């Protein structure tokens, strides 16, 4: 039901724009670090963390110098973690989750125990499943996941007031394990509910297997026959590992620190981070990559011909095609300029999967964009930093080859990143300082109050 007419909305939207507009020059005048970024693009130092590190440059003699990208989880290179999983032919996300939560790699016995604890929590109670997901299915799956996480507080065994006030590490650890374990199930069920109630499909609800990994369970829960190959599960497991953590300064993890500093409960903290990740400038980048790829295939002519693809990429960069932003999605990152280690690792697995699926023509298209795109961007922005392929260039393609619906691309990011949010919450609780409250400079002229009868 529309209660406000469009003319009124348009008129008052203009009032807001006029009242709130700030001349961009004033940000530099007052030394404001927009986006908490320094002038050279580096992040403003606002905290310390022991959990993860994104390394894409060094500062030498006061100058920023790009280096090949590295990603560390608790000081261990993600490349080494992935290499060990590949060598030992096992799924690694659960081991990475343990590392991020507890600060060290588990022993064989600890890993078995950790997997058993996650397995025990994977199944949702019938009441929670019905009331939090199925009874009110959301067309927006990220909203549905966030709502389910908030709803979980009502199913906590203790009174909500007690849960809200309990900031103990023991209680938050137990709730963290619950959320990490159930996030794949919640995301899968939220999609099944949307597919049934909003898209006219059959309602297909299968129980997770406590003995299987997060990747295996997710594929089983979203597929009609519940079946998957070892390569498919390994590929999804790798994607979960690569999306699990990206330093305390990424938007959703920073949200975790901000809201935890206010002493909110863990359910509200994780839900807030989910809704931050939902933003198209954060977790939805691989969707934009896939939409752009669809456009290239449709309008570039024969996309098997390199010349056609390069010409169309130039049109995108010149804002004559694409979404008008001039951005070639899948290229460029706030920290990585020479290489994104996540993209490198996922690209190798994507090639294996593309060979198995008979989709090497498309794989070569993605690789062509990685090869030709940076020069096209640099030619139009010669003073800008170099750009490289980021993980989003290949993650959407991987999900497509796995038959994962696009509605689940960003929710999968939340499934992977949940452990990071829980770890960063623990870090904030243990090292609790004052509530996070940066300063904003007011811009106004003192004005006299005008009585209502004298206003025009």
Image: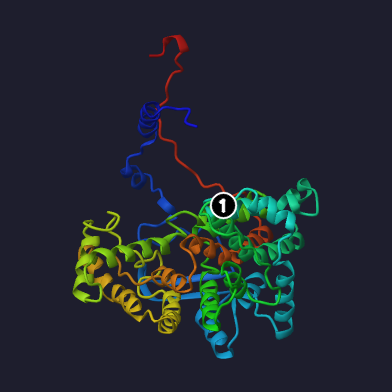
Left or right: 227, with 124 as reference point: left
Q: Residues within 10 Å of mark 1 (few under 14, many from 20)?
A: some
| Quadrant into which the C terminus falls | top left
Residue that extends furthest to the top in the rendered view of this protein: 453
**Res 172 quadrant in image:** bottom right
Q: Position of residue 417 (x, y in %)?
A: 56, 65
State whether residue 414 is above or below residue 258: below
* Place of residue 121 in the rendered image (x, y in percent of width and height, measured from the top left): 72, 66
Q: Position of residue 450 (x, y in %)?
A: 44, 15
In the rendered image, the residue lying farthest to the bottom is 87
Please, is residue 432 above or below residue 5 in the view? Answer: below
Q: Is residue 49 visible?
A: no
Q: Looking at the image, how many numbered discs can be counted on the residues?
A: 1
Colouring convention used in this rendered image of the protein: rainbow
Quarter of the image for residue 329 reads bottom left
The residue most toward the right is 158
Relative to residue 289, is residue 238 drawn left or right? Answer: right
Q: In which quadrant of the rendered view does residue 274 lie?
A: bottom right
Q: Residue at x 53, y 61 (%)?
A: 411
Looking at the image, which is closer to me, 64 or 231?
231
Q: Secondary structure at mark 1?
A: helix
Determine whether 332 is above or below 83 in the image.
above
Is 50 or 254 nearer to us in this picture?
A: 254
Nearer to the camera, 410 or 334: 410
For disc 1, the marked residue is: 197
Q: Is residue 15 visible?
A: yes
Q: Position of residue 223 (x, y in %)?
A: 56, 69
Left or right position of 332 against 3 = left
């Amino acid at each position: 039901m529309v209660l406000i007419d469009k003319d009124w909305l348009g008129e008052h939207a203009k009032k807001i724009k006029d009242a709130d507009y700030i001349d961009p020059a004033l940000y530099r005048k007052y030394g404001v670090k927009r986006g908490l970024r320094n002038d050279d693009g580096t992040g403003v130092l606002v905290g310390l963390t022991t959990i993860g590190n994104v390394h894409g440059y060094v500062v030498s003699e006061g100058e920023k110098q790009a280096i090949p990208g590295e990603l560390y989880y608790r000081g261990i290179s993600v490349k080494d973690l992935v290499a060990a999983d590949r060598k030992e032919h096992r799924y690694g996300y659960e081991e990475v989750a343990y590392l991020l939560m507890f600060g060290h790699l588990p022993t064989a016995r600890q890993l078995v125990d950790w997997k058993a604890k996650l397995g025990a929590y994977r199944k949702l109670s019938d009441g929670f499943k019905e009331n939090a997901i199925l009874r009110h299915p959301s067309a927006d799956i990220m909203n549905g996941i966030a709502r389910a996480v908030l709803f979980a507080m009502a199913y906590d065994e203790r009174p909500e007031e007690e849960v809200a006030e309990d900031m103990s590490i023991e209680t938050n650890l137990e709730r963290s394990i619950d959320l990490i374990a159930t996030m794949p199930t919640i995301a899968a069920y939220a999609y099944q509910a949307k597919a049934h109630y909003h898209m006219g499909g059959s309602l297909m609800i299968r129980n997770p297997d406590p003995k299987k990994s997060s990747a295996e369970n997710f594929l089983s829960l979203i597929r009609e026959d519940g079946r998957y190959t070892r390569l498919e599960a390994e590929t999804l497991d790798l994607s979960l590992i690569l999306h699990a953590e990206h330093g305390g300064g990424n938007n959703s993890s920073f949200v975790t620190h901000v809201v935890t500093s206010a002493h909110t409960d863990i359910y509200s903290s994780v839900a807030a981070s989910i809704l931050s990740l939902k933003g198209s400038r954060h977790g939805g980048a691989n969707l934009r990559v896939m939409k752009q790829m669809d456009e290239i295939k449709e309008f570039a002519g024969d996309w098997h011909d390199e010349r056609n693809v390069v010409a169309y990429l130039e049109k995108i960069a010149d804002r004559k095609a694409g979404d008008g932003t001039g951005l070639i999605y899948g290229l460029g990152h706030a920290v990585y300029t020479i290489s994104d280690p996540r993209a490198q690792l996922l690209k190798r697995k994507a090639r294996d999967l593309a060979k198995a699926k008979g989709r090497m023509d498309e794989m070569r298209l993605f690789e062509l964009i990685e090869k030709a795109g940076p020069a096209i961007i640099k030619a139009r922005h010669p003073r800008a930093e170099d750009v490289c392929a980021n993980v989003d260039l290949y993650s959407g393609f991987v999900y497509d080859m796995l038959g994962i619906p696009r509605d689940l691309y960003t929710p999968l990011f939340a499934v992977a990143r949940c452990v990071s949010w829980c770890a960063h919450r623990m870090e904030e609780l243990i090292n609790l300082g004052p509530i996070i409250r940066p300063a904003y400079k007011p811009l106004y002229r003192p004005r006299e109050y005008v009585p209502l009868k004298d206003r025009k």
